[in-house]
Image: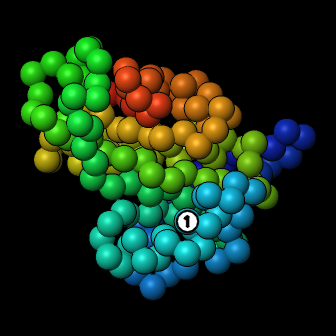
Amino acid sequence: MGMSGVDGTGAAAARFLEPRRLQPGEELGSFSCSVELIDDWAAKHASYAAKQGTAVPYVCFTTDGDVAGFYAISAYSIDRETVRGGWLRRNVPAKIPAILLGMLGVDSRFQKRGLGWMLLQDAVKRSLAVSRQIGSRALVVDPYDDASRSFYQHFGFREIPGSGSLFVRLRS
């Protein structure tokens, strides 16, 4: 089943397919979100990360086969000594288990249609499922600028005390 959005003019947006795992050897093609850090990772590292198992990229295609957006998640830990107080630090090992949302980008052609939110929801859903299997306290993101920080905070991410990272608690 596909996902769809509506653009600012009210016209029907491109139909988006459900995100799926990037297969080793697959490339993200002409993806460009106009953020150099994300574009560079998509072009140079996504396929390699999938092949090596260092991150798992999930890609959302349009029904026309264009890459509309993607995100990547991986195992992560937060050094307990870097966290100042709160539930995140309480009764946990020295390395707090977490999942890192390392990248999330929406191609410039498909921005402002709700796809970023849809990808974030999918990342949270998958991370929650993983946390039920292996244990993980939070989904963590390191915003690359103020706009990305605002995006994640708008959807409930909070700052990890003592760091610039943001997190959302993973719980059933």
Residue at x 33% of width, y 55% of height: 74
User: Picture quarter containing residue 167?
Assistant: top left
Residue at x 41% of width, y 67% of height: 21
Q: Position of residue 41 (x, y in %)?
A: 55, 65
User: Between 165 and 32, which is closer to the camera in this rendering?
Assistant: 165
With respect to residue 96, does 38 lie above or below?
below
With respect to residue 95, does 2 lie above or below?
below
Q: Position of residue 22 (x, y in %)?
A: 45, 71
User: Between 34 and 117, which is closer to the camera in this rendering?
Assistant: 34
Q: Residue 148 vs residue 85: left or right?
A: right
Q: Quarter of the image containing the C terminus? A: top left
With respect to residue 133, does 25 lie above or below?
below
User: Between 167 and 22, which is closer to the camera in this rendering?
Assistant: 167
Element type at marker 1?
helix
Residue farthest right in this picture: 9
Q: Position of residue 88 (x, y in %)?
A: 24, 23
**Within 10 angstroms of label 1, few (less than 14), some, or many (20 or more) residues?**
some
Say which residue label 1 marks.
41
Looking at the rendered structure, the kind of residue marked 1 is: Trp
Residue farthest bottom in this picture: 25
Residue at x 38% of width, y 73% of height: 50
Q: Position of residue 152 (x, y in %)?
A: 54, 32
